[in-house]
Amino acid sequence: MMEINTSPVTQIERLGTESFRLLKVLLAPGQKLIVEPGAMASMEAQLQVETLINQGFFQATLLKFLGGESFFINYFLNPDQKPRHVFLSQSTPGEIIERDLKEEKLYVQPGALIARTSQVQVQVVWAGIASWIGGEGLFRLELSGSGRIWYGCYGAMIEKEVLGDYIVDSGHLLSYPPEMKLSLKLAGSLFSSLLTREGIVLKLSGHGKIQLQTRSIKGLAQWLNPRFWG
Amino acid sequence: MEIEKKYGPAATIAICKLNAGETLVAEGGAFMAMQGPVDVTTTTRQKGGGGIIKGLKRIFSGESFFLNHFTAKNISEVWLGTPLPGDIMVHELQGDRLVIAGGGFVACESNVQIDLQWQGLKSIFSGEGIFWIKASGQGKVIINSFGFIYPIDVDGEYIVDTGHIVAFEETLNFEISKASKSWIDAFLSGEGFICRFKGKGRVWCQSHNPKSYGQELTPHLKPKQK
Amino acid sequence: MYPGIFVQNRDQRKFSVQVDFDLYKVSFRFFDGEKTEYIEWAYRDLVWEMGGNRNSLLFLGTKENPDRLYFEIETPLIQEIKKHEGLKDIWQEVSRDRKKSSRSALIWATSIISVLTLLIVFRGPIFGSLGSAIPFSWEKNIADQVLNPKITTEQQTLVKKLDHLIKKLKVDPEWTDQLTFHISSNTEPNAYATLGGHVFVNKGLITELKSSEQLIGVIAHEMAHVHRRHVVRSLSQALGVFSVFQLLIGDISGLAAILIDQGGPLLNLQYSRELEEQADSDALMQMIESQIDPIGLSQSLQIIRDQQQRLISQSPGSEALNQLQKIEILNSHPDIEKRIQSLTDRAQQLKQESLKQGRSISPIEFDYEKFKNEIKERF
């Protein structure tokens, strides 16, 4: 029976630039890492990968359809006697952020999660209606526990210490701590904004450190759409 | 021909310095700018045959239908850009062959033959196209990637996600297999498939996967209004 | 002389060489940049294996030496090898391997096609059931938070009137408990069911239709969608099909974009034909069992269709076409005429059967005209 070493992974090499970040993670013998499907770019063949349903069938379904995450999750294990590497990346060009969680909670942009150590839980939680209308989705990804997490952002990452109120465009919000409240700022009536998705921005209130990303997928789509189909 | 890479690894271009009489063969769309007396012909064929059928086959591999031949009458420069933001690699062939995956081919010297190679049925699963490009002969080949390129020297086995393969030496064999143990997992996980390289040789990987990026973007794109 | 590639093991450098196949040995020369080397390997010392990309390379070497010589396995090479007695077992194995690979290709092709067919044929149940796994209370919670607009007391009275009308449909109380009706001031002749049992009836629909039976027809259709959890299932189905195709073909971004439209997906879902037909059948059954004239459904469709055609002729531009697309009840049916005809026929059939069984159809006791006018005023 192999002893599973659950302490944070020891060696990470950050390759590339902040436009295209790649992580080379060296797993010590016996070490385990939970990785999102699709995050693996390449790896040594000695590593074992087990694909399991992400925290139970029901949570997994929620994570897939509502949280933007995957139904399945990959457990990477190094059964070998030597350290073995895996290269981790994300779907959008940008920076990868590494963070230590110490018995705390963090809300992260759905789909941004790349990897986590095994004592960190991921849950889909109700984010409130403001979040949905703001385009952030009805549900939030809540990361909790202790360990290390890696999540990617689209573009570069800007950290901001908020005291009071701060307005962000949906699509640029990457992560925020649970002490902060999310609410809506509307230009018109609820229904008109609902159907047109215009005049909506998110307001964060409270005291905490939030993270923004410099680019947004919706922004790109908005730019592309009129250019498609002539 | 001297090839210089500039502005890497995110927005790399290739500056090709041609001597009199040298020809650069580049895919349609790669051309950025040039300086000096250069003749340009556009054909569907490569030196030594090809034609329309090969051009059509090229589309299957993600390349463009047309090839541009830049022939320098005197010392000149041709600047080539890439369709995807990322890196460029220049590989010198010495009679051996290089397999280039999904659309990575940019240009090559005229002594290099570009062929389309049927990768077998398994490549349908790879999602990277069923024809990959086989470059052979003597000379330089210019290849581009999405993200930056990192080489791995394989001796035994190595696993690469199919969307992250740029190119590999012919001495490597590969198997497309599933990332997990069961077939159901593979179909439903959205993970796609992985490529298990066996043998001894070098594989070049890219840091990002154009397919995942596209998938991320797709739900936000509006369908064609009828 | 035959061309091959020599790989020097210590630095993995490659050299293009011309190889001689003699009576009992292979020999070749290579130039490593400084000097020319001559190598000889006797056949009896040869170790060989097939490998490389697509197993299309033949590697030769000796036990003592880690350097390798390799060739592409092609017919001319096989001819060359055949000539030499000492290489007979190489030739036999190589040609056997080539035959095997074409057979396995055939097996692969057949299995892929059968799996694909199964998945496509059964995708509905597979992915739809995943959607139904979400409990209704979840759905209702979500939707309640979203869809409770503020309305005046006058408007509230009218909604109550609508509820009263709908109660003429004698459905399972369990059904109606799950439903909340709203009237919206939208002038499109449309009604739609969304998550959590919320059904929206547009002002435009009420004012366009002419009788209670017609309105009941449309509402019964929407109620069926809710009861059968079509809303949730449709969403999951759309996502499911997308994933399947994507894995196997690699790129269906256009199809995906259509399936997962961002514009208010919860409010305006496109159902598949089967789901539409199911809702139609349910509506007819509900009506006949409540002794309401089932012709109402096809009549309402006709009215809506007529209105659409008027719109198109009046403003032949994308505006009208956009509106057309949004009419959920007319969507996903390539042939609206056929549907109207089929519903009319079935309604007649059901009425006749019902009469035979001694049950009569009675007109609904409800002043539709008055209701319509009040709606026109207050919304």
Image: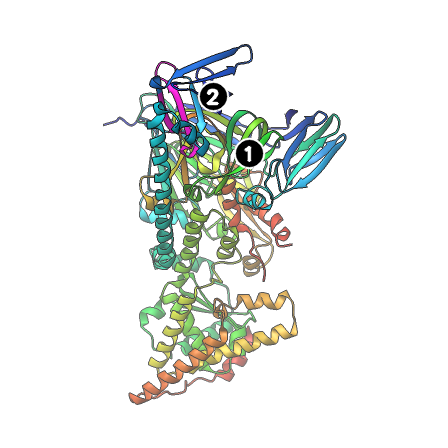
Please report, as a chain letter, where disc 1 is located: B
On the picture, is B81 further left or further right than A14?
right
Residue reaching furthest left? A1
Tell me the crowding category of disc 1: few under 14, some 14 to 19, or many 20 or more residues within 10 angstroms, Cα based. many
Residue receiving disc 2: C19
Residue type at mark 1: give it.
Ser
Q: Is residue A67 visible?
A: no
In the picture provided, is A223 more to the left or to the right than B100?
right
Q: Secondary structure at mark 1?
A: loop
Provide residue C49's location: percent of width, then percent of height. Answer: 36, 26
Q: Is residue A2 visible?
A: yes
Relative image position of residue B14 (x, y in whole percent): 64, 29
Residue A120's disc number: none
Task: Report in which chain the residue with disc 2 lies.
Answer: C
Q: Is residue C133 above or below residue A105?
A: below
Res. C274 image quadrant: bottom left
Vertical side of B117 occupied by C130: above or below? below
Q: Which of C232/C377 is in front?
A: C232
Q: Say if the magenta span includes residue C136.
A: no
Q: Is residue A6 left or right of residue C375?
A: left
- Tell whether label 1 touches label 2 (CB within 8 Å): no
Residue B206 vs C339, above or below: the answer is: above
Name the residue at 56% across, 36% down. Answer: A155
- Residue of label 1: B145
Magenta segment: C47-66
Q: Nearer the viewer, mark 2 or mark 1?
A: 2
**Quadrant position of residue C297:** bottom left
- A182, C205: nearer the viewer: C205
